[in-house]
Image (cartoon, rainbow, N blue to C red):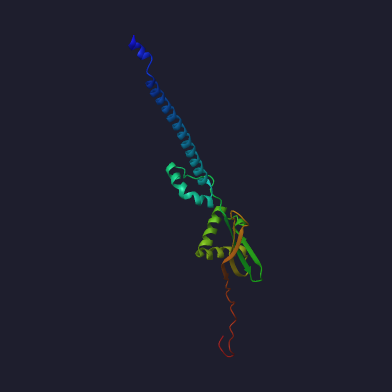
Amino acid sequence: MGTETEHKNPKPGTRRRAGGKRARATKSSVLWRRARDIGASVLIIVILSTAILSSLPNSVLKQTAAPVLTPVARATGLDQNWGMFAPNPPRTFSVLEVHVIMSNGEDRVWLIKDDPSMPGLYWRKIKEEVIKHKDFRDGLAAWVVRKMTNKGERPARVAMVVKTETLPFKGEPKRAKRVIYDVRIPHPKRNEPQVTEKGAPS
């Protein structure tokens, strides 16, 4: 009977040890859940911050955070931006004007948007090449002169002007104008009648 009583009524020291183990287990479980929640919250914040900053256009904030967030973005695959769906709009717009100045002073201006002979996409590509490379300017100038003049008219000069407008993040747009081509068009001299001396054979 004494043995059964001992099993049913454990000693106070045994109860304290069991209670201490349960308390430690409960405390460890609470700490683990708290650490897990904090870690999950931090991870969500990092992922959202990385995704948002990666999708923003170039800015001071993005450049400042890039050294920290770029490794995270590459490791998690968040470096894929939305450029293929919504590319950054250009902030610099250029307009090419070709001026054909006639011998009487008339200025005839040719603009890409007013010429339907080719789709706008092709004209924009030609415009970019003409602005960047001067080797293409002679050909375009000659073509525009032929297009803007009629038979018998005398163009005196042809010039190309690039008007640029830059849209900053803040403030007023910046406008600039520069001449990239200016050539006088030579005209053949009229054949002067030959003067023969008296007595000379004609």
Residue in view at x 63 percent, y 68 percent: 101
Q: In what quadrant of the picture does the C terminus appear?
A: bottom right
Q: Please name whichever residue, 99 or 142, is drawn nearer the observer in this view of the structure.
A: 99
Q: Hey, which residue is sitting farthest left in the picture?
A: 3
Question: Does 114 sit left or right of 25 as displayed?
Answer: right
Query: Horizontal and vertical percent for residue 87?
Result: 53, 48
Q: Is residue 70 visible?
A: yes
Query: Horizontal and vertical percent for residue 2?
Result: 33, 11
Residue in view at x 35 percent, y 14 percent: 6
Q: Is residue 13 above or below residue 69?
A: above
Query: Horizontal and vertical percent for residue 124?
Result: 55, 56
Q: Hey, which residue is sitting farthest bottom in the picture?
A: 199
Query: Horizontal and vertical percent for residue 118?
Result: 56, 54
Q: Please name whichever residue, 173 or 182, is drawn nearer the observer in this view of the structure.
A: 173
Q: Quadrant of residue 16?
A: top left
Q: Is residue 47 above or below residue 33?
A: below
Q: Quadrant of residue 95?
A: bottom right
